Image (cartoon, rainbow, N blue to C red):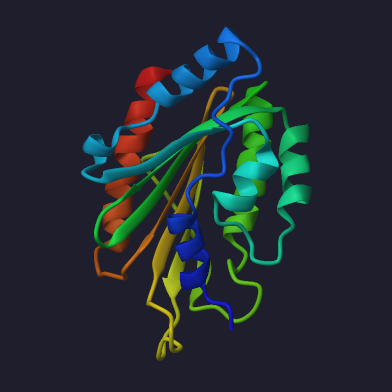
Amino acid sequence: MVGLASVLAVIALGACGADDSDDDGGQSEDSAAELSSSLPTADDLGLEERHEAEWDEAADLLERDLVIGGATDPSELGAEIDDAGFQIAVGSDLASEKLNVRLRAIQFDSEEGALEARDLLHDEDLKSPCPDACIVSPIDYKLDAVPDSTAVHHVPNRGAVPPGQLAVEAHHAEFVIGPQLYVVQADGEPSATFSEDFDELMGTVYGSASDAG
């Protein structure tokens, strides 16, 4: 059985597979810096920063650094996101003792492309993150305070957790401001306030992005 906990362990421990080099000169550096400045800091969210990175290829972002459907080919999904006008992505991995958070800001060449990619990623969020049996079930989730957003709650399945795995709860969300797509994935120890805490976190992320816009 391949469970979500093992998927998330790869995300948390593997570090971002980005190429931090800049092959496009100062313009690319400026774009990345501007995107990064639109994301909240670890201090803003009361978390510790574990890693930050930049991605030039959508497939690299999907293959190692975001949770997508367990049966999805990241290269194929990356090609679809490239077709939507992907230009560059930046982000950071943040954590506390009981929570992992992945923040991503992705630049597209148009708002229409950003919306298209948002919907592609939302479709992935609604798929099981495991290729076989899983310890969570994804359901649609509403972020009332974040315009142009989609979200999913990965609800822990009832019953005993298989040996070698940890109980996990997660939320994934995406929202668009102009040609920028923001992606947030949070996972950690299940709790009665997990969704409430995620809503609060999303309010901070949206506030930072909208202030920058």
Q: Residue at x 59, y 15 (%)?
A: 28
Is 150 on the left-hand or right-hand side of 163?
right
Task: Examine the rendered structure and indicate whether residue 87 appears above or below residue 65.
Answer: above
Occupied quadrant, residue 71: bottom right
Q: Is residue 29 left or right of residue 194?
A: right
Q: Residue at x 55, y 56 (%)?
A: 67
**Along the line of sight, the residue nearer the viewer: 54 or 41:** 54
- Residue 21 visible in the shown view: yes
At a point 40% along the width and 41% down the height, the residue shown is 51
Q: Residue at x 59, y 23 (%)?
A: 179
Residue 103 locus on image (x, y percent)? 43, 41
Please identify the quadrant where the C terminus is shown. Answer: top left
Q: How many marks?
A: 0
Q: Tell which residue pokes out farthest to the front in this image.
A: 21
Q: How far across and down, in percent of the image, does residue 130 sit? A: 60, 71
Q: Is residue 41 left or right of residue 17?
A: left
Reply above or below: 90 against 172.
above
Provide residue 143's location: percent of width, then percent of height. 41, 48
Quarter of the image containing the N terminus?
bottom right
In the rendering, at what x and y percent does residue 84 appear?
Answer: 73, 33
Residue situated furthest top in the rendering: 26
Could one spot residue 141 in this view of the protein? Answer: no
